[in-house]
Image (cartoon, helix red, strand yellow):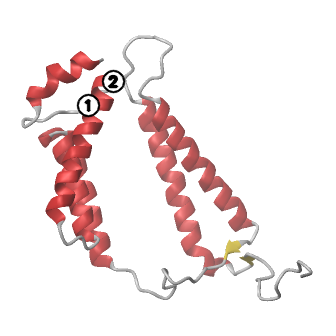
């Protein structure tokens, strides 16, 4: 055995393509950049009680924003250099598959519903609807199990973030009775 690299391996993992063929990558990078800026601006709008030296509620949004912005800039640099990663076929991915716009629309509707319902129904209920709705949209046969799992995860997040980290996640009318318990944890 000589340890030589097989001749079947591709010579390069990137290709140079005309600008028109890379429009999807530019859209992705632009959306990532816009989302990173949106998260950064939103992080500055978070009210921080007191002036302690503890880790506050802005740390995670700042981290997410930095990752989004850095990733978008790195993708844009590579695109302007003319390098695009080749599509990779595998047994799990069908490269030529068409976009399922109905499923995508369902997912967008459930994310918007989650954002609207947080203040109205509370974090746990909104998270349960999002989790169950996404599972149903992606083909879960037992959507009600996903709904219950989402409710359990929503309550867990509510207790951890609201009780231990002191963040204010709305309980809503259904779980309002838990407020004294959650406050006692912090």
Left or right? Give the position of 42 relative to 63. Answer: left
From the top left corner, tell me how far across and down residue 87 is, in percent. Answer: 61, 80
Query: Residue at the location (28% across, 65% down)?
Result: 107
Q: Quadrant of the C terminus?
A: top left
Q: Which mark is residue 164?
A: 2
Figure quadrant of residue 124:
top left
Please report whichever mark, 1 or 2, sits nearer to the chain's N-terminal start: 1
110 on left or right of 44 = left
Taking the spot 71% from the left edge, 60% from the top edge, the residue there is: 77
- Seen as rendered, the residue at the extreme front is 1
Residue denoted by label 1? 159
Q: Name the residue: 67% across, 56% down.
A: 74
Q: Position of residue 160 (x, y in %)?
A: 31, 31
Q: Are marks 1 and 2 in contact (CB under 8 Å)?
A: yes
Name the quadrant containing residue 176: top left
Q: Position of residue 174 (x, y in %)?
A: 7, 37
Q: Nearer the viewer, residue 125 or 145?
A: 145
Residue 169 shown left or right of residue 96 in the figure: left
Answer whether residue 65 is visible to the viewer in this image.
yes
> Residue 94's mark?
none
Q: Secondary structure at mark 1?
A: helix
Report the residue at 15% width, 19% height from top. 180
Label 2 element class: helix
Instruction: Give the answer, above or below, for where 72 lies relative to 118.
Output: below
How far apart are labels 1 and 2 at the CA level?
A: 7 Å
How far from the left and from the top, in percent, is residue 90?
A: 55, 82
Disc 2: CA contacts within 10 A as few (<14), some (14-19) or many (>=20) = some
Q: Is residue 166 visible?
A: no
156 to 47, vertically: above or below: below
């Amino acid at each position: 055995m000589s340890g030589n690299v097989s001749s079947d391996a591709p010579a390069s993992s990137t290709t140079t393509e005309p600008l028109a063929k890379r429009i999807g990558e530019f859209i992705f990078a632009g959306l990532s950049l816009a989302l990173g800026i949106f998260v950064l601006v939103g992080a500055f709008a978070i009210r921080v009680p007191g002036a302690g030296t503890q880790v506050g509620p802005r740390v995670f949004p700042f981290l997410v924003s930095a990752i989004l912005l850095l990733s978008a800039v790195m993708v844009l640099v590579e695109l302007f250099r003319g390098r695009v990663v080749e599509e990779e076929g595998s047994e799990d991915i069908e490269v030529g598959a068409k976009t399922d716009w109905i499923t995508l629309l369902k997912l967008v509707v459930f994310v918007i519903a989650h954002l609207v319902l947080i203040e109205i129904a509370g974090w746990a209920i909104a998270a349960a609807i999002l989790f169950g709705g996404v599972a149903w949209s992606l083909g879960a046969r037992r959507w009600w199990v996903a709904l219950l799992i989402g409710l359990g995860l929503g309550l867990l997040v509510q207790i951890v973030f609201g009780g231990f980290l002191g963040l204010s996640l709305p309980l809503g009318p259904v779980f309002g009775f838990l407020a004294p318990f959650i406050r006692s944890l912090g």
